[in-house]
Image (cartoon, grey):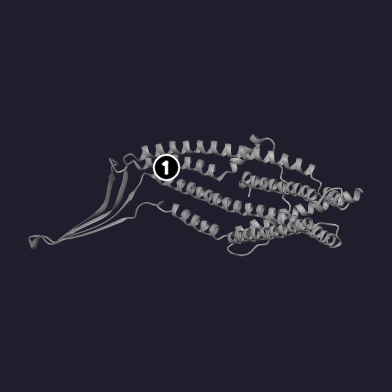
Amino acid sequence: MKNILIIIVLMFSVFTVYSQSSMDSVLAEIERNNTTLAAYRKNADADKMGNKSNLLPDNPEVGFNYLIGSPDNIGNRTDFSVTQSFDFPTAYVYKSQLSDMKNEQVEMEYKKQRYEILLSAKTICSELTYLNALYSEYKLRLNNDMKIANAFKKKLESGEASILEHNKAQISLLNTEKQLEQISIERDAELQQLATLNAGVSLSFNDTIFIENMVETDFDEWYAQAAINNPMLNWLKQEIEISSKEKQLQLAQNLPKINAGYMSEKVVGQQFQGVTLGVSIPLWGNKNTVKYAKLKTEAVNSIEADAKVQFYNEMKTLHRKATALQSSITDFKQRISGKTILELLDKAMQKGEISLSEYYFELMVFYDNKEELLNMEKELSFTLAKLYRYDL
């Protein structure tokens, strides 16, 4: 007996690992092939390259003047100059730091988009697990209904059953067949959605058992880690740092700019050449830019505070829902003992202890409970996918 129990446990463990790897393999395949994600990746790379532009000084300026003298005897004048303007040195340091920070933010945005696509795929997989399990359940129902329908057909022929009982058995069989067809249609539709996420390439997914992932009971401790992994909160945190750095950059750019270069002047019999220096005085060119950077930082701080509140409340709601569903599922599983109930109902009907109507009534109650259990497991799977969406 002990060896049998060990074998059962090992079989369940193997199936669970297979189910998990099946989900993981689907997600990995979609991440490789998803066209939307590939487009996001290219856009992110382009944005990162764009953030590296404008880090160097402005382009140098070359000037040339050819002036005709009047009267003619004074000759013509030729001027040539090359000048380069420079921001205050600290501005280039801030520009470089801003470029790196914005590139990190681009990666955070890409991760957010990745999480959303993989969450969609995981939700579809959960729906498919439910439909696969429901299809298997209805296959069993179909076999049972066929057995009952055949039994009542024989009883009708021998005069032991009425035409009403025979018709009721046939209607139940027909309803089960139609339900199987409907489930098959829905399953094909979900597989098509999965293929759409996989660049049109079909994927198979045959799991029928939901993975039993237990929710951590200490919400606040779990939330502290979840908040660290949240790309939106990280994006906002980075946006605050960027706003602060942009404020420093604006202050540096409000300092005088330096112009330096070479200049030459030629007239008849004379030539002058040497260096030229100039200073750009920031009187109105950058007016209100520092005020804008300060107000932008305050605004992003407020947005971050609001996002934290929203995320905390969302996770708290999902956590409560998940723990409540887990409790209900455990209670349901303890109450439902499928094989025993079906055997008892079948024996009672065969012995004539209950009528066909009573049999179908009890059977429908049992089937409804089984479906309710599957629905709760599916809902728990959806909830856990949202709760742990940043662990994908």
Q: What's the residue at 12%, 62% (across, down)?
A: 75
Residue 172 visible: yes
Q: Which residue is mark 1?
A: 246
Left/right placement of residue 45 relative to residue 265 reads: right
Query: Which residue shows up at 67% across the image and 55% down it?
Result: 128
Across and down, in percent, residue 117 comes to 58, 53
Residue plotted at (73% across, 43% down): 329
- Residue 310 place in picture, x, y as percent: 54, 38
- Judging depth in this view, the residue of 390 and 248 nearest the camera is 390
Q: Is residue 233 left or right of residue 13?
A: left
Element marked by disc 1: helix
Type of amino acid at the residue the image marks with label 1: Glu
Judge from the rendering whether residue 85 lies leftward or rightward of residue 129; answer left or right. Answer: left
Relative to 108, is 328 above or below?
Answer: above
In the image shown, does 261 or 239 lie closer to the viewer? 239
Q: Quick check: 41 above or below 247?
A: below
Task: From the top left corner, tell me how far across and down residue 172 is, in percent.
Answer: 74, 56
Above or below for 48 versus 201: above
Residue placed at 45% from the left, 52% from the top?
51
- The crowd level at tag 1 (other Cα within 10 Å; few <14, some 14-19, many 20+) is many
Residue 215 in sight here? no
Q: Nearer the viewer, residue 187 or 389?
A: 187
